């Protein structure tokens, strides 16, 4: 079993000792992404909708760097600062993920890096 770190300059750099994703055979494990614009290295303004969109766009860039796409995602975990924003997040999420939807868990957390409102991690299967 070989393990390969995935890195792309099209997504925000890791802010610690971790990879943007790790590929093991056909599985890709994407680290959590927050709504950082990779060009400015800052959280996008505009609330949960804009941050959710940026998070998913960041994940798409990491998936692409590994030879996959959003259609390869089989599981996500969504971390929200406020579950009261679930419905708004879910609308944006549904613009990107299509049936059959990935399995998903969503939880409220006390704090996220850089004051983010949302973080999403993903697992993908890439042939």
Image (cartoon, grey):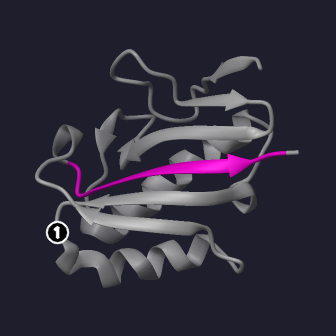
Q: Quadrant of residue 42?
A: top left
Type of secondary structure dominating the magenta stretch = strand
User: Is residue 95 toward the left or the right of residue 74 in the image?
Assistant: left
Note whether 62 is above or below 94 in the view shown.
Answer: above
Residue for point 34% across, 23% down: 15
Residue 81 placement (x, y as % from top left)? 18, 61
Pick whichever, 88 or 74, lies toward us. Answer: 74
Residue for point 31% across, 52% down: 44
Residue 62 placement (x, y as % from top left)? 62, 39
Question: In the image, is residue 39 part of the stretch drawn in magenta?
Answer: no
User: Is residue 36 toward the left or the right of residue 54 in the image?
Assistant: left
Q: Helix, strand or loop at disc 1?
A: loop
Pick whichever, 101 or 7, lies toward us. Answer: 101
Question: In the image, is residue 121 part of the stretch drawn in magenta?
Answer: yes
Residue for point 72% across, 42% down: 64
Pick whichever, 5 or 48, lies toward us. Answer: 5
User: Is residue 21 toward the left or the right of residue 118 in the image?
Assistant: right
Q: Residue furthest right?
A: 127
Residue 89 placement (x, y as % from top left)? 36, 74
Residue for point 63% across, 42% down: 61
Q: Residue furthest front?
A: 1
Specify the segment rendered in magenta.
116-126
Is residue 22 visible to us here? Answer: yes
* Residue, disc 1: 82
Position of the C terminus, as image quadrant, is top right
Pick whichever, 13 or 22, lies toward us. Answer: 22
How crowded pointer 1 is (Cα within 10 Å; few <14, some 14-19, many 20+) is rated as some
Note whether 99 is above or below 45 in the view shown.
Answer: below
């Amino acid at each position: 079993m070989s393990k390969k770190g995935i890195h792309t300059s099209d997504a925000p750099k890791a802010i610690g000792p971790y990879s943007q994703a790790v590929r093991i055979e056909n599985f890709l494990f994407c680290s959590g992404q927050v709504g950082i614009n990779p060009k400015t290295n800052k959280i996008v303004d505009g609330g949960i909708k804009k941050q959710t969109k940026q998070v998913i766009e960041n994940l798409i860039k990491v998936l692409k760097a590994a030879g996959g796409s959003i259609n390869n995602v089989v599981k996500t975990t969504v971390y929200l600062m406020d579950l009261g924003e679930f419905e708004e997040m879910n609308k944006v999420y549904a613009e990107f993920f299509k049936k059959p939807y990935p399995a998903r868990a969503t939880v409220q957390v006390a704090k996220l890096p850089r004051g983010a409102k949302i973080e999403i991690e993903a697992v993908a299967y890439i042939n």
